[in-house]
Structures are given as C-alpha cells and as structure tokens.
Image: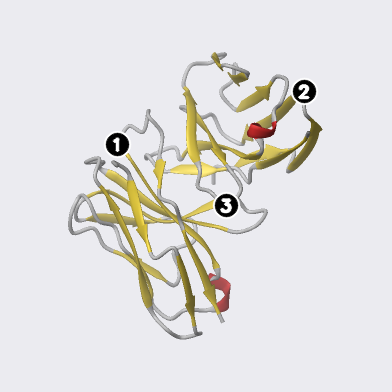
Amino acid sequence: GQQVMQIPQYQHVQEGEDFTTYCNSSTTLSNIQWYKQRPGGHPVFLIQLVKSGEVKKQKRLTFQFGEAKKNSSLHITATQTTDVGTYFCAGPRKDNNDMRFGAGTRLTVKP
Amino acid sequence: NAGVTQTPKFQVLKTGQSMTLQCAQDMNHEYMSWYRQDPGMGLRLIHYSVGAGITDQGEVPNGYNVSRSTTEDFPLRLLSAAPSQTSVYFCASSSFRGAAGYTFGSGTRLTVV
C-alpha cells in the first residue's frame, strides 16, 4: 500500500542554522499536508500542497511539492527555539480521504 | 472554543479491562478518525468515519471498535486492553475534502499494565 517516508528521523541544529525535512511517497499523491507537533502536544496543521511543483511560504518556512507529486520538503530558514518539535508530512490514500502520516522528523534547536 | 475534545487525558488500565475513549467535535466536520502514536512510528490510523453511521478500518484496527451515531461524536472502544495498546491516542476531524487539514484533539495517554 501507499507509504510516506520521511527523513531524517532526527535533526539537531544550532539556533540560526537552516533545517530541511524530506517526505517521499511510493505513489503519486493528490496532495500533501504538513503538521507540527510540539513536545507533549498534538499535531497542528501547517499547510496543504496540491499542484505539481508548488512552492508555498509561511514566514521562515518554505514548503515544496515535487514535479512528480511523489516528494515534498519543508525548509526552515534561521531556526529559532520556537521551531522545536516534530514535523510530519501526510498524504491521502488513493481512494479516500484518510491521511497516512510519515514517521516525522524531530527537530531540536540549541540556543 | 471550537475544536476537538478528547477525554480522558490520561488513563491506566489493567490487561483485559475495557474502556471507551471519547471524542467530540463542534465544527460540523464530516470526517473523523482515530490515530495512535508510538515512538518512532508516527501516527497510525486505527479507524475512521466519513459521516454519521459510516465507519471503516484503518491500518491497525485490531482490538478496537468505533461507532458514529452522530456527526459530533466518535468514541473509540478498547475491547480487552493489552500492553501493546499502551500509546498516545489522537482523535482528528476535517471537512470531507480536508483542504484545511485535520484538527486534532489534545490526546489520551493510555498505559496498559
């Protein structure tokens, strides 16, 4: 079945450094969503990408959807301690609405 | 505040006990789902519902039952708790097209001893 793989599993950066997490699917996705989960919290929706090659920005966060709609990335410029958490990508199963989540990338930021 | 409400927040069960995790949303979302989260494994779908009266299995349904008698409520029942069901459980809802993403509840941390 469709799987969504995320790398890396962990990333530790110095405050001010950039950070990127990658999401890859075994099948073409109709859309991809990104979520952030703070330690001890629940996942919070960040964004959805739908179009091939789409790029969206939210302040220091840049989201990309690959041309083949099988991969996506989230890039954070100049990380801050408030960026700490686990970032998940999620893609829908082919025939319905439910989303399958990647294992997540856990980001820690050293001040 | 509008959103997804889960109860309880914490629960300890003995092996073999049964219990129901409650989930309610007030956003009139058609779609609701239950996930479990275990370290290093992300969020795995247990059951989901596309509307009142309709439920279906996700990736890891064994040992769990659900029902959807109203749009607002989607309880998850553990039939006979096992230590392997120790996890954090999240309920989520979305409009059917999901373009605004899922709204998650704050979670239930369940320990089975």
Q: Chain of mark 3?
A: A
Nearer the observer, B26 or A28: B26
Residue A8 at x, y percent in the picture: 75, 38
Report crowding for label 3: few under 14, some 14 to 19, many 20 or more residues within 10 A (C-alpha): few
- In the image, is B22 to the left or to the right of B85? left
Instruction: List the residue tagged with mark 1.
Output: B96
- Would you name the residue on which mark 3 appears? A40
Q: Residue at x 39, y 80 (%)?
A: B18
- Image depth: mark 1 or mark 3 in front: 3
Expressed as whole percent of the image width and height from the top left, the position of residue B25 reads 28, 48
- Quadrant placement of the C terminus of chain B: bottom right
With respect to residue A80, does B59 lie above or below? below
Q: What residue is rendered at 52% in x and 37% in y?
A: A90
Crowding at dot 1, Cα within 10 Å, few <14 / some 14-19 / many 20+, comes out as: some
Circles 1 and 2, Cβ within 8 Å, touching? The answer is no
Q: Gap between marks 2 and 3, in whole Å?
A: 24 Å
Disc 3 residue type (three-letter): Gly
Compared across the picture, whether B96 is left or right of B101 comes to: left
Check if mark 1 and mark 2 are on a common chain. Answer: no
Where A82 falls versus B78 (above or below)?
above
Q: Are marks 2 and 3 in contact (CB under 8 Å)?
A: no
Structural distance between the alpha carbons of marks 1 and 2: 39 Å
Q: Chain of mark 2?
A: A
Tell me the number on the disc at residue A16: 2
Q: Secondary structure at mark 3?
A: loop
Which structural element holds mark 2? loop
The disc at residue A9 is none
Task: Return the x and y of residue A58 as percentages of the image width and height.
Answer: 54, 18
Q: Nearer the viewer, residue A28 or B1?
A: B1
Q: Quadrant of residue B19?
A: bottom left
Q: Specify whether residue B104 is in view.
A: yes
